[in-house]
Amino acid sequence: MTTTILFTVVSLSVLGLLLALVLYLVAQKFKVEEDPRIDDVEAILPGANCGGCGYAGCRAFAEGCVKADSLDALYCPVGGNDTMKNVASYLGMEVAEKAPQVAVVRCNGNCDSRPKTNHYDGYSSCAVMASLYAGDTACSFGCLGQGDCVVVCNFDAIKMDPRTGLPEVDQDKCTACGACVKACPKFIIELRNKGPKNRRIFVSCINKDKGGVARKACAVACIGCFKCQKVCPFDAITMSNNLAYIDYNKCKLCRKCVTECPTHAIWEVNFPVRVPKKEEEPVVEQ
């Protein structure tokens, strides 16, 4: 009995050593030499692993930077231009500076302007709600208000406003990682340039219905009236499918479109408060 046990232990030990040796030889044969610079570049990155760069995480992005011939197509939205300059300096490359961006919510239909027509009583998720039906208001394009964008934000930069039922973005916390953009099933969130002095103008609506239908569903919807396009002196506004869109690369922030919009669907952010023009007093002849 003792001899059998001893033989079993020795056999298993020898078998284990043989398998370990085989695994070692296989690992040595197929091992991939990794560029040590990847570790250094990863250390420069913020470590958010948000995927906003288009890679699975910071290490994958670092590997992409090391292997790239140019950094022009690579950008870390969390670290921004300073981080990319540090990466470029370490790799002995140059990188063009990019305009910082921020997420904007292109839906202005709050509870008052876009009243509910039914009550959703399912699982609290925009994705689930969108897969079931068009929404609980007459506008099939607007925000569903379940907060999927809030859940995916790793930077606490977006909150649901209980008063309006819409998400609000904190521009100081937003890193433009794009997670909320991907999470929104209605595609109402867009990354746009922050603009000079953080000022920007955009159409806060994506309703593509004709004017009368859109206005009936939401009091602040874009009705495709072309008025904003006609007054824009910089050809920054295009009309497509009854909806206006402002190209932030062409917009010079003159704000003519804002005052021209009859439904107030165009938003101006971080501008000084407009001072009402004083009416000229009539001249009385004496």
Image (spheres, grey):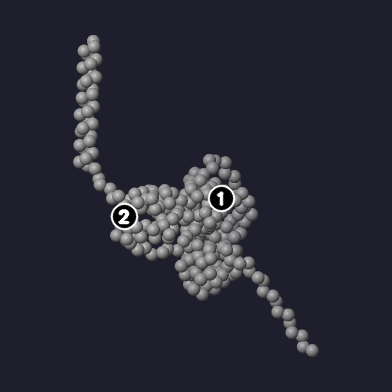
Q: Determine which of the numbered discs, if any, sits on residue 89 in the image.
A: none
Please tell me how crowded label 2 is: few (under 14), some (14-19), or many (20+) other residues with Cα within 10 Å: many
SS at circle 1: strand
Amino acid under disc 1: Lys
Amino acid under disc 2: Val
Q: Mark 1 points at which residue?
A: 159
Q: If the image is split into quadrants, where does the N terminus sit? A: top left
Q: Is residue 207 something that shows in the picture?
A: no
Q: Relative to 117, does residue 18 appear above or below in the rendering?
A: above
Name the quadrant containing residue 87.
bottom left
Q: In the depicted view, which residue is nearer to us: 11 or 124?
A: 11
Q: Name the residue under label 2.
A: 66
Please tell me how crowded label 1 is: few (under 14), some (14-19), or many (20+) other residues with Cα within 10 Å: some
> Which badge, 2 or 1, comes first in the chain's sequence?
2
SS at circle 2: helix
Q: Is 53 left or right of 137, judged from the image as shown?
A: left
User: Is there a contact, CB below 8 Å, between mark 2 and mark 1?
Assistant: no
Q: Relative to 228, does residue 34 appear above or below in the rendering?
A: above
Q: Residue 16, how many percent across, how many down?
A: 23, 27
The residue depicted at 59 percent of the width and 60 percent of the height is 220
Q: Residue 255, how many percent across, how many down?
A: 56, 70
Q: If the image is split into quadrants, where does the C terminus sit? A: bottom right
The residue depicted at 54 percent of the width and 46 percent of the height is 146
Q: Residue 275, how many percent across, how many down?
A: 65, 70
Q: In the depicted view, which residue is nearer to us: 195 or 237?
A: 195
The residue depicted at 42 percent of the width and 60 percent of the height is 81
Q: Of discs 2 and 1, which sits in the foreground? A: 2
Name the quadrant containing residue 270.
bottom right
- Farthest residue, direction bottom: 286
Q: Is 283 left or right of 213, judged from the image as shown?
A: right
Q: Is residue 59 something that shows in the picture?
A: yes
- Farthest residue, direction right: 286
